[in-house]
Image (cartoon, helix red, strand yellow):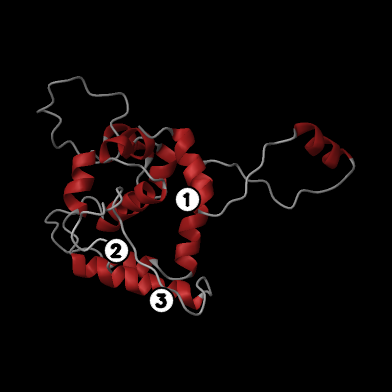
Amino acid sequence: MTTREQLQETLCDRLFWHTAERDDAKVADHLFHCHEMDVVYAMDEATLFDSFFNYLQEIEVFPFLAHLDPQKQQRKNVLFIQLVLILLMKVAGSIKTMEETNDLLLTDELLMSMCGFNAYQVKNGSCERGVKLRTTPIPEIRGSLCVDTVANHIVTITPRRIENFFNRCIQLLAKQGIFPKKIHAACDCTLYETTSKFKGCGSV
């Protein structure tokens, strides 16, 4: 099971933050001699996601996130892009299962505020649907959404939309000079390596 500490370590690694252990004595000495700090960051997952989302906005990825919406929601009390942002957090944080997102994401007020949810929604849920059918006591913090809601909406995104999204993202990243002039690579979203016995193994 993914822990919050593992989530932070994964984000630091994937989002290219170089971290070091804090030396309080050195910091105090630096400040005592009238030197100013350029900036101070809290090294938590909220800070890392905030920087990540800001970067995506700067290179204009967010409009393409909105295009992932298959327009199949009948009653939109939650925008589809909010669900996409939650999925993006799950993937970037290497959270293996949807169930784990409840403790690590959906019940975290700060992270959910970055996806457009307020404190009331995180504590009480975004709607009352399903409350009367519960056979167990309502938790003190329900979470902005239930994991089934997120999963059931995300699976409606068509492969074609996902393909277009990735292609446009690659184009935007190329404009930023992220890639070398020539690359030869393949993307695989699965958690498991293909065995040598699998038909087509080693082919792209």
| Figure label count | 3
Q: What element carries label 1?
A: helix
In front of the other: label 1 or label 2? 2
**x and y, in percent, of residue 142 in the image:** 28, 31
Q: What element carries label 3?
A: helix
> Which of the marked residues, 1 or 2, is nearer the chain's N terminus?
1
**x and y, in percent, of residue 28 in the image:** 81, 35
In front of the other: label 2 or label 3? 2
Query: To which quarter of the image does residue 183 belong?
Result: bottom left
Q: Which one is nearer the viewer's eye here, 77 or 159?
A: 159
Amino acid identity at mark 2: Gly
> Which of the marked residues, 1 or 3, is nearer the chain's N terminus?
1
Q: Do the residues labelled 1 and 3 touch (CB within 8 Å)?
A: no
> Which of the marked residues, 2 or 3, is nearer the chain's N terminus?
3
Query: To which quarter of the image does residue 147 belong?
Result: top left
Which residue is found at the position 29% from the left and 48% from the top?
192
**x and y, in percent, of residue 151 in the image:** 21, 47
Label 1 Cα crowd, 10 Å radius (few <14 / some 14-19 / many 20+): many
Which residue is found at the position 38% from the left and 44% from the top?
112
Label 3 Cα crowd, 10 Å radius (few <14 / some 14-19 / many 20+): few
Task: Give the residue at mark 3.
Answer: 171
Which residue is found at the position 25% from the left and 56% from the top?
80
In the rendered view, would you say 17 is above or below 59?
above
In front of the other: label 1 or label 3? 3
Task: Give the residue at mark 1.
Answer: 49
With 96 as the anchor, is 92 left or right in this view?
Answer: right
Query: To which quarter of the image does residue 43 belong?
Result: top right
Quarter of the C terminus within the rendering = bottom left
